[in-house]
Image (cartoon, grey):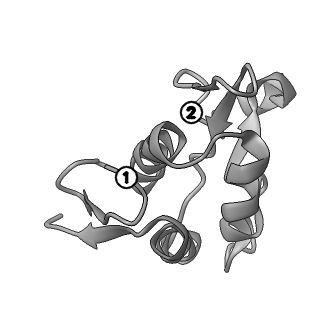
Amino acid sequence: MGKGKTCIVCYHEMYNSMGQTVLGVIQTICKLYVSSYEELKSKLPDEIANHGAQFTQHPVVVKKESDLKDSEKTPKARFFYNEPIYLENDNFNIVVSNQWNEDNFAAFCKAVNEEFSIEIEFGKD
């Protein structure tokens, strides 16, 4: 799928959580659309993760794996640190936040639609 094409992701049909949906979409974005961490961060800024989430302790969408603190892994993981995404042009891994609620997930869906023409549809629960 090249740029300009629409990708439709069905939340609940393909993934079992908002966080898993975000992870899958970012994996696709990194594979098909962006060439660097800086480009990804410019298109999906951390403000998305903090949108309407007053109590989010780690308001980031993605983070360099090397910047991940032990406290962000355990006892309750805040990132999908077991599923890092390798960015070949940067030669390092990134991890995706798993801290998503209805507000910041809606902001994420809007951003990926505007930036990458990826539509996230809501399927059956």
Q: Position of residue 116 (x, y in %)?
A: 48, 64
SS at circle 1:
loop
Which mark sits nearer the N-terminus, 2 or 1? 1
Q: Is residue 91 visible?
A: yes
**Which residue is at 52% across, 49% downward?**
33
Q: Quadrant of residue 68?
A: top right
Q: Identify which residue, 83 or 93, lies in the foreground.
A: 93
Q: Which mark is residue 56?
A: none
**Which residue is at 17% across, 54% downward?**
13
**Which residue is labeled 1 in the image?**
2
Q: Is residue 35 above or below residue 61?
A: above
* Image quarter (top left, top right, bottom left or bottom right) of the C terminus: bottom left
Q: Which mark is residue 80?
A: 2
How far apart, in angstroms, are the residues tagged by discs 2 and 1? 27 Å
**Which residue is at 39% across, 51% downward?**
21
Question: Decide: marks 2, 1 in contact (CB < 8 A)?
Answer: no
Task: Answer with left or right where residue 43 lies relative to residue 70.
Answer: left
Figure disc tally: 2
Q: Position of residue 85 (x, y in %)?
A: 57, 28
Task: Answer with left or right where residue 51 lies relative to residue 34.
Answer: right
Q: Amino acid at mark 1?
A: Gly
Q: Position of residue 26 (x, y in %)?
A: 51, 47
Q: Is residue 45 visible?
A: no
**Which residue is at 67% across, 63% downward?**
43
